[in-house]
Image (spheres, rainbow, N blue to C red):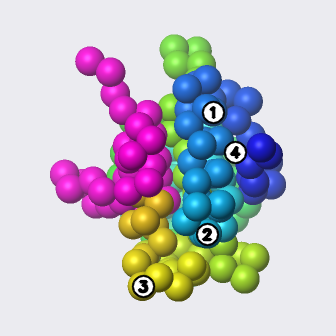
């Protein structure tokens, strides 16, 4: 089964177990839960993680200077909010960690990504991100939406840490 990814997003640098679970996750989301999704992020360089961490914490002009040097699109004031709480992301790949062990998704509503925590595309009165989190957990993923020790990250899923 082909999985739907946003422009430029691939699983080329993803852990083989993550790829396997992403396929199961996508199939269950679309065919069983009737929630259309798209994968929005799998792997990123540490420099990208750093600029994402700076977003919403530094002046927007300074963040955009960094983004421009990295070849990333510039943000406007509507995008000036915190998007990550850590520099130690499971998305980051480098010489010490060649494979990502995390992915992010978006629920699609009318064909567009919807980041609203309460979105309910399948109409069953249960927020879709919560349904997806519980399903992800049932297949062996750690869903960011169910985190209690840090701010929940609704679209984030990762392989559990071993050890």
What kind of element bears circle 4?
helix
Report the mark closest to the observer, 1 or 3: 3
Residue extending farthest left = 149
Asked where in the image residue 127 lies, by quadrant, the reply is bottom left
Q: Which sits earlier in the primary sequence, circle 4 or circle 2?
A: 2
Report the mark closest to the observer, 1 or 2: 2
Q: CA distance from mark 4 to mark 3?
A: 41 Å
Q: CA distance from mark 1 to mark 3?
A: 30 Å
Q: Residues within 10 Å of mark 1 (few under 14, many from 20)?
A: some
Do the residues bearing badges 1 and 4 touch, measured as CB atoms within 8 Å? no
Question: What range is drawn magenta here?
Answer: 134-163
Residue 98 marker: none
Residue extending farthest front = 32
Name the residue that disc number 1 marks: 19
Tell me, yes or no, if residue 35 can be seen here: yes
Which residue appears at 32% of the width and 21% of the height?
162
What kind of element bears circle 2?
loop
Q: Which sits earlier in the primary sequence, circle 1 or circle 3?
A: 1
Q: Quadrant of the C terminus?
A: top left
Name the residue that disc number 2 marks: 34
Residue nearest the observer in this picture, 21 or 163: 21
Is residue 153 part of the magenta span, yes or no?
yes
Q: Which sits earlier in the primary sequence, circle 4 or circle 3?
A: 4
Report the mark closest to the observer, 1 or 4: 1
Which residue appears at 71% of the width and 76% of the height?
112
Residue extending farthest top = 96
Name the residue that disc number 3 marks: 125
Do the residues bearing badges 4 and 3 touch, measured as CB atoms within 8 Å? no
Residue 96 location (% of width, % of height): 51, 14
Q: Which sits earlier in the primary sequence, circle 1 or circle 2?
A: 1
């Amino acid at each position: 089964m082909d999985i739907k990814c946003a422009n430029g997003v691939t699983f080329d640098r993803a852990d083989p177990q993550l790829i396997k679970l992403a396929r199961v996750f996508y199939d269950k989301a679309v065919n069983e839960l009737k929630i259309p999704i798209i994968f929005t992020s799998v792997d990123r360089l540490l420099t990208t993680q750093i600029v994402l961490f700076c977003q919403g914490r530094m002046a927007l002009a300074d963040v955009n200077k960094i983004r421009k040097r990295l070849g990333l699109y510039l943000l406007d004031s509507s995008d000036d909010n915190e998007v990550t709480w850590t520099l130690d992301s499971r998305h980051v790949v480098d010489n010490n960690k060649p494979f990502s062990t995390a992915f992010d998704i978006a629920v699609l509503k009318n064909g567009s990504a919807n980041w609203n925590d309460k979105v309910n595309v399948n109409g069953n009165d249960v927020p879709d991100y919560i349904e997806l989190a519980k399903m992800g957990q049932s297949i062996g993923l750690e869903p960011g939406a169910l985190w209690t020790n840090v701010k929940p990250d609704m679209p984030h899923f990762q392989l559990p840490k071993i050890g």
